[in-house]
Amino acid sequence: MQSYEVLIRGSGCVGRSLALALNAQGLRVALLGSVEASQAQREDVRSYALNAASVRLLRDLKVWDTLPPEAVSPVYDMVVHGDQGGAVLEFSAWQQGVGELAFIVDAGALEQQLAVALRYAPHVQVVDAPVLADLVALCEGRDSAHRAELGVRFESHSYGQRGIAARLVSDAPHQGVARQWFRSPDVLALLPIAKPTPGASYGLVWSVPEQQAADLLSLSESEFEAALNAATDGEAGQLRLASPRSAWPLSLARADAVSGPGWVLLGDAAHLVHPLAGQGLNLGLADVAALAEVLAAREGWRPLGDERLLRRYARSRLAPNWAMGELTDGLLKVFASDKPALRELRNRGLSALNAVPPLKRWLTARALGS
């Protein structure tokens, strides 16, 4: 019987990336879960906003440069609209002194290229049943089936919202500009992407209350497009649907522990944040980088499942993951309120922040992961 040093439960982007990172260290890894693209994955309409740190990791894993050109779009500028008085906040790669603020990546293409890379990973074996290993890494997502078996509580707070995703095509070029509207009580984001029409496509992420989401999803395509174009007021041109719509529930959640003797949690199995900042996968890939670094630097006599060793990983991720959760939660609460005084304050705050370049540069640097 083959022995393994690490068992990874979950074969999404986080699990696959971890398997590749540990393969590079020569560790014997079992990856539990299929890496073959299902029909749902092939038709995935999601898009990820990846920061510089995530791109560095994927490049180190020999995945980034294999992504097809039509799956990756750079973001050069971002425009954030308030919901009153023309309040706006603008970010620019040029002002930040970087080539781009982020990259928008087709979710299905990224998963596919991670799967291709795994075929050439000699120390990774895809398995269809659990195996014994010194360390178990749970990367099963928000609905992890084995988290509770470890005695971990997943403290979740529902936002009472759903995120609606779709692919859109505009009659105007996007020019690498991402756009976002904070409109009480919803948040709408348009992420420039190359598929299906290069230079004129967007990934939609529209976070809306449950009933509004149900209403929007029940609309015909033309009715949905009318609602979307009314919400964006022509800022991104006339938009039309280029894919089916999908939706998922939104929550803020944290595991009360992310490591223990012989186990760790990564990605959505450890934390969930609101998608308004586009940082979900970035946090998961940062977990991967941190765990790989901790394991690579371990003392030769210390086993992989050593509880003290794994606490180093937990400590390194505690502050970043907590801070992003608090930031997104705080922003949502401020912008979802319909109180007139708070509405005026938040919109004035956007305009005031837009006039302070040093503060904008600091905020941008945090989001870039640089």
Image: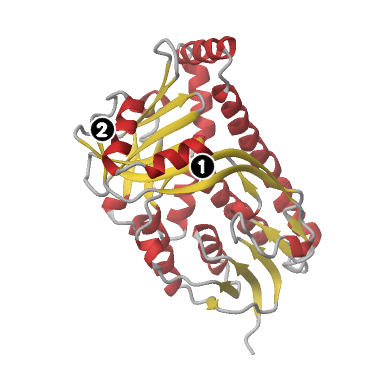
Q: Nearer the viewer, mark 1 or mark 2?
A: 1
Residue at the (51%, 10%) spot, across then down: 348
| Residue 162's disc number | 1
User: How are the residues colored?
Assistant: secondary structure
| Residue 175's disc number | 2
Label located before the other in sequence (1 or 2):
1
Residue 50 seen in render: no
Q: Element under label 1?
A: strand
Q: Element under label 2?
A: loop
- Using the rendered view, name the quadrant where residue 354 is placed: top left
Residue 232 seen in render: yes
Q: Where is residue 271 drawn, in percent x and y? A: 64, 47
Q: Where is residue 43 drawn, in percent x and y? A: 35, 59
Q: What is the three-letter code of the residue carrying label 2?
A: Gln
Q: Is residue 152 left or right of residue 355?
A: right
Q: Is residue 207 left or right of residue 175?
A: right
Q: Where is residue 15 drawn, in percent x and y? A: 55, 62
Does 273 appear above or below 115?
A: above
Q: What is the three-letter code of the residue carrying label 1?
A: Arg
Residue at the (26%, 51%) spot, across then down: 70
Judged from this view, the residue extending furthest toward the left is: 171
Numbered-mark total:
2
| Image quadrant containing the N terminus | bottom right
Q: Is residue 184 left or right of residue 217?
A: right
Q: Where is residue 131 drawn, in percent x and y? A: 66, 79
Judged from this view, the residue extending furthest toward the bottom is: 1
Q: Nearer the viewer, residue 215 or 156?
A: 215
Does 148 appear above or below 35?
A: above
Q: Is residue 159 left or right of residue 97?
A: right
Q: Nearer the viewer, residue 84 or 9?
A: 84
